[in-house]
Image (tube, rainbow, N blue to C red):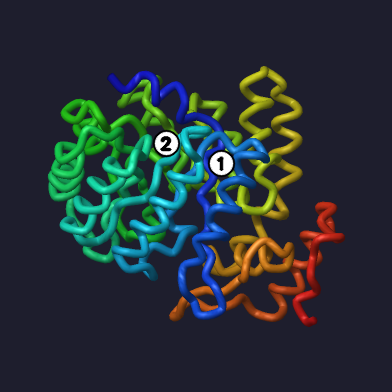
Amino acid sequence: MYEEIKSRLRGSIAPVVTPFDKNLEVDTKEIENLVNWHIESGSHGISVCGTTGEPSSLSLEERELVMETAIKTANGRVPVAPGTGSANQKETLHLTKRAQEMGADAAMVIVPYYNKPNQQALYDHFKTVANSVDLPIVIYNIPGRTATNLEVKTLARLVEDCKNIIGVKESNKDFEHVNRVLLTCGRDFLLYSGIELLCYPMLAIGGAGHISATANIIPEKVADIYNLWAKGELDKALDLHYKLMPLNDVLFKETNPGPLKAAMGMMGKINPALRPPMGPPSESLERELCETLQSYGLAEQVINPSS
C-alpha cells in the first residue's frame, strides 16, 4: 500500500525554516519562495515544522498554515512530509489528521519532548497516532532535544504492528543504534540521517537519505551527496561529504536554527528573525558564518552582518 511513497521519499528531504516578517508573523510568501527554490535546486522532498522550522514557537493554527502553504506550493512536484508531532498527544493527532486532509505525502512525528515517557508509553503514543490516519508516518528520534531515545526494540514493535510507519529520522550520534534499526526493522525500512556529519555514512549502511538543515544554504550540494551515491560515484560523494563539513560545523556552533537563519539572512534569502526566547547568534559566530559562506563561493551574495 505504501510502496509508491517509499520509493519517492528518498534523497535529500529539505527541512525548510519558518520565515517571519518584521512583526514576527509567519511569512507565507517567503515559504513559497523557499519551497520553489529547494525544488528548483534539486531537493528530493520538503519537510516543514521540524526542529529547523521552530514548531514549538508556532501556534497550532500557524503550523497548519505553514504545512498548507508548503503542500500547495510543492503541488506534487516532490513529496512533502511535514512535522506534526509535539509533547501533547491531542495536538499531535490533530496536526497529523490535518496533514492527511491537506494532501501531505507523509507525516514526520517527533518523540515527545520534555515529558520523557518510558518505552511502553512511546509505543502506545506512536501506535495511537499511526492508527488515527492512513498517512505514512516517519518517526523522528532526536534524543538531544527530547531527552528520550526511542529504543530499537520499541521501534521494531511499532513497525510490526503499524504498517503505515515506514521510516525513521535518526538524529542520533549512536551509530551502533542506527545500524541496528535496519538490522531489526528490515533493510527496506526508510532510515534518514538527521545529523549532518552522518549523511554519507547512513547511505553506506543502507539509509534512504537525509534531512539536513544545511540544505537551507546549499540545497543542490546536499542533494548531490545522495545523487552521487545513487549513481555509484562513491568517491565524489565522499569528497562532497568532507567539503561540506566546515559549513555543517559552523551552522551548529549554537542552537539550530539560530546560526542557520543568520546565514540565510546574510545570503538575502530571508529575514533572519527568530521568535523569543530564541535569539540571534553571537557577534563572533556571525563573523565566522560570514567568512564560511564566503569560503564556499557565496561571497557575492553575502551581506556583511555589521552593515
Task: Report x, y in % for residue 44.
Answer: 56, 34
| Above/below status of 19 relative to 205 | below
Task: Report x, y in % for residue 266.
Answer: 73, 67
Q: Amino acid at mark 2?
A: Val
Residue at the disc numbered 1: 198
**Horizontal relation, residue 38 to residue 28: left or right:** right
**Horizontal relation, residue 113 to residue 162: left or right:** right
Label 2 with label 1: CB-CB less than 8 Å: yes
- Give the position of the C terminus as an image quadrant: bottom right
Task: Report x, y in % for residue 103.
Answer: 34, 38
**Horizontal relation, residue 264 to residue 48: left or right:** right
Q: Residue at x 71, y 73 (%)?
A: 286
Q: How far is the residue under mark 2 from the one under mark 1? A: 10 Å
Check disc 1: other Cα within 10 Å, few if <14, some if 14-19, many if 20+. Answer: many
**Horizontal relation, residue 127 to residue 49: left or right:** left
Task: Report x, y in % for residue 271.
Answer: 62, 70
Q: Nearer the viewer, residue 13 or 77?
A: 77
Q: Residue at x 79, y 70 (%)?
A: 303
Q: Amino acid at mark 1?
A: Leu
Q: Residue at x 55, y 53 (%)?
A: 32
* Secondary structure found at label 1: helix
User: What numbered label is drawn on residue 178?
Assistant: 2
| Above/below status of 53 relative to 202 | below
